[in-house]
Amino acid sequence: MKTKILIVDDSRIFRSAVQEGLSRESDIEVIGSVWNGIKALEFLESNDPDIITLDIQMPEMDGLETLAAIQKLNAERPDDRHIGVIMLSSHTKKGADITVKALEMGAYDFITKPEGGNIRENLEILSRQLVVKIRNYALRCIPAAKGKKPVVKPAAAAKKKVEREEISYTPVVKAILIGVSTGGPKALAEILPPLCERVQVPIFIVQHMPPTFTESLARSLNNKCRYTVMEAGHNMPILNRHAYIAPGGQHMVLEKKGRETRIMINDLPPEKGCRPSVNKLFRTGADVFRQHAIGVILTGMGTDGTDGGKQLKLYGAPVLAQDEQSSVVWGMPGSAYAAGIVDFIFPLHEIPDAIANMIR
């Protein structure tokens, strides 16, 4: 069964190039191509795509307005027949701000439109990235494709979901380390405000995003939280009631400087394709805080966080993971669970209380 795609973009050249790129994939079918949100909604009256690629800036009805209308339609449909939305964004500050808002509204993911260089090569790269995101959405959200998804077999050490009252943790917690990717902005917008109401310790977050977008994410979360939420800077001291987000395209690590812990930012090579890397944050956080940290792995594609989580476990720090049902993609938490390093698994909405109860 092919995944059906609707392309929505005001550039005819761009629509044609994306359609050409997707047409080479045997499991993907472009069933429509329109130039603005109004036309997209008209198309949906008589057609049923699985995924819509949605440009942010369009005449008459822009991407956010169109997304809101699609989400309204989704609210009236069964959960397994929701229409997924992948945003097409620019690298500008305005583009990043709108993209973060779209992700918080429930867009599945986003891709940045290439700028400069060879236009044909850029469009080829974008098409390849889009194919990966379409296939991951299909495996997670489309019933016919979900049947093909490999079953994750947890190692014996991994624990099943536990009730909140079963949580017990004795050491004083000095830091919360969070790793997240696909679905992250919406997940963080849900759990960070209530978590910041319940705890005092610094929070460190690696969200897989390009430069500019993490700054927009930090600004959005700062408006929602009691904490000060900021994009981390090099050699920055850490403070309670602060949350630090790794800057896009750079690693955030923690180092002990005498009696003080500081944030270090570097441009070292990606680890397993990720920069910023959850593994690097978890490893350095484990070395600094030892058993006094909590590791949290939320929704995301890939395996980032598993290797670093092993270092947390060596020091006796607990690792929490988001459950599969509430995850947009259960790649990162599923990988950690299969490796046997996860102590507790919770639905997303229960994670703030779970962490707060460990810090009591």
Image (tube, rainbow, N blue to C red):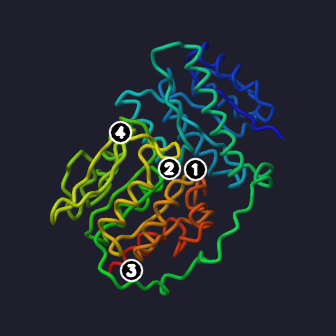
Q: Which residue is at 32% across, 74% downward? A: 292
- The reply to whether callout 2 and callout 1 are in contact (CB within 8 Å) is yes
Identity, as a three-letter code, of the amino acid under mark 3: Asn
What residue does disc 1 label?
301
Q: Residues under labels 3 and 1: Cα distance? A: 28 Å
Identity, as a three-letter code, of the amino acid under mark 1: Met
Indicate the position of residue 65 as horizontal and vertical percent values: 50, 35
> In what quadrant of the picture does the C terminus appear?
bottom left
Indicate the position of residue 299 as horizontal and vertical percent values: 54, 56
What residue does disc 3 label?
357
Element type at marker 3?
helix
What residue does disc 2 label?
181
Indicate the position of residue 266 as horizontal and vertical percent values: 32, 42
Mark nearest the camera among 3 and 2 is 2
Indicate the position of residue 84 as horizontal and vertical percent values: 63, 43
Q: Please report whichever mark, 1 or 4, sits nearer to the chain's N-terminal start.
A: 4
Nearer the observer, 226 or 233: 233
Element type at marker 2?
loop
Q: Please report whichever mark, 3 or 1, sits nearer to the chain's N-terminal start.
A: 1
Q: Residue 267: which numbered mark, if any?
A: 4
Q: Classify residue 280 by image quadrant.
A: bottom left
Identity, as a three-letter code, of the amino acid under mark 2: Ser
